[in-house]
């Protein structure tokens, strides 16, 4: 069970003066149950790639398969395969449209042909997942919410469709730290409960290092690196530098401490890992 991206290329406005090759020979595979971060500079092709993963765009060359089915097809199997991939777009709150939060979240499951009872159950459970109290919020307008709450409604709308794979395009962009933590704690809850395949697009190395097991690094429409986050931040620093990509703060701090003579081992990906590495290097015992 996986999304397979097989040598895909894509050009916007091909054969015009505005032609722009956004993806070039990209291949990778994400299995169900994996949490992968897709990182890269602005304009590197992340969103374009994401839109290929649920069949919104089709590649000029190569193909994308979900559980073995090519998304390009017009038959029922291809439609079903596209329906397995949920997509939270960049700034998803811009896509809220209904008069009430209930109606907004119910739109997807209703389109999937669920009965009114099933739609109701899906809305309730999606709202519970994103921590929005049904009794308080269901009948309210989505446009009277804070940015973080709107984002949660948009995520609930995707979760309500119970996708097997979830693509999230910068879900925390523009949010304050508390809303950001909220979104990620809900996301990790859903991920662990449903064992979906998750692809998180982010500009934050901290988010990539903290949540993802594996990184995909894009630049100029090509996939340059694909591997475990710790390996990439340990062994591929030169490539990251060439691509002008950063590393997490904890990795930088560990470097500085080593330069100052502390024999600190490993590549701490988070603040908590850095603290443990310092404790070990200093021979402190945690209480
Ligand atoms: N609708 C479009 N029409 C034409 N060109 C586009 C379109 N969308 C994106 N592009 C171009 O394709 C390339 C890849 O853009 P894309 O939006 O996929 O990058 P990104 O990595 O998601 O960037 P960001 O981090 O800013 O979201 C860029 O050169 C961009 O200008
Ligand atoms: Mg983008």
Image (cartoon, grey):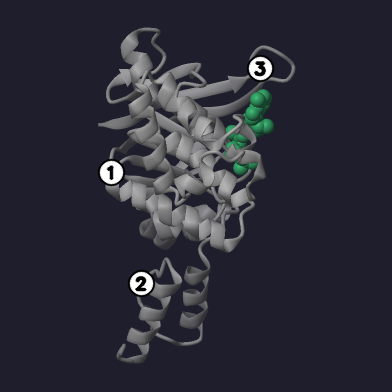
The CA span between labels 1 and 3 is 37 Å
Check disc 3 and report its element: helix, strand or loop: loop
Separation of residues labelled 1 and 2 (CA atoms): 29 Å
* Residue under label 1: 195
Q: In which quarter of the image is ligand 1?
A: top right
Disc 2: which residue:
266
**Which x, y percent locates residue 235?**
40, 59
Residue 52 at x, y percent in the picture: 48, 25
Q: Which of the two labelled residues, at mark 2 and mark 3, occupies the earlier sequence position?
A: 3
Q: Is residue 53 left or right of residue 137?
A: left
For the point 43% across and 32% down, the residue is 86
Percent from the top left, x then y, of residue 19? 68, 20
Nearest to the observer: residue 3 or residue 168: 168
The residue carrying mark 3 has its beta carbon less than 8 Å from ligand 1: yes
The percent position of residue 104, horizontal first and vertical second, equals 53, 32
In this rendering, the label closer to the viewer, 1 or 3: 1
Q: What element carries label 2?
A: loop
Q: Residue at horizontal 37%, vertical 52%?
A: 188
Find disc 3 in the rendering and name its residue.
13
């Amino acid at each position: 069970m996986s999304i397979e991206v097989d040598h895909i290329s894509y050009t916007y406005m091909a054969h015009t003066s505005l032609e722009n090759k956004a993806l070039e020979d990209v291949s990778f595979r994400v299995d169900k149950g994996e949490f992968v971060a897709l990182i890269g500079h602005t304009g590197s092709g992340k969103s374009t790639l994401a839109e290929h993963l649920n069949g919104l765009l089709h590649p000029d060359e190569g193909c994308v398969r979900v559980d073995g089915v090519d998304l390009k097809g017009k038959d029922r199997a291809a439609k079903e395969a596209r329906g397995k991939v949920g997509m939270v777009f960049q700034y998803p709150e811009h896509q809220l449209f209904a008069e009430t939060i209930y109606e907004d979240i119910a739109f997807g499951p209703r389109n999937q042909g669920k009965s009114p009872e099933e739609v109701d159950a899906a809305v309730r459970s999606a709202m519970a997942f994103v921590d929005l109290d049904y009794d308080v919020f269901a009948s309210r307008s989505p446009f009277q919410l804070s940015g973080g709450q709107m984002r949660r409604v948009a995520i609930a709308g995707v979760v309500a469709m119970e996708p097997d794979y979830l693509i999230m395009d910068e879900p925390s962009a523009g949010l304050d730290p508390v809303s950001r933590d909220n979104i990620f704690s809900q996301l990790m809850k859903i991920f662990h409960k449903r064992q979906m395949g998750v692809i998180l697009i982010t500009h934050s190395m901290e988010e990539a290092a903290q949540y993802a097991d594996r990184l995909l690094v894009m630049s100029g429409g090509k996939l340059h690196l694909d591997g475990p986050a710790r390996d990439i931040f340990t062994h591929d620093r030169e490539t990251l530098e060439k691509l002008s990509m950063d590393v997490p703060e904890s990795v930088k701090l560990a470097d500085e401490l080593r330069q100052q003579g502390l024999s600190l081992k490993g590549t701490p990906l988070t603040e908590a890992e850095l603290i443990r590495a310092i404790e070990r290097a200093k021979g402190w015992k945690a209480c």
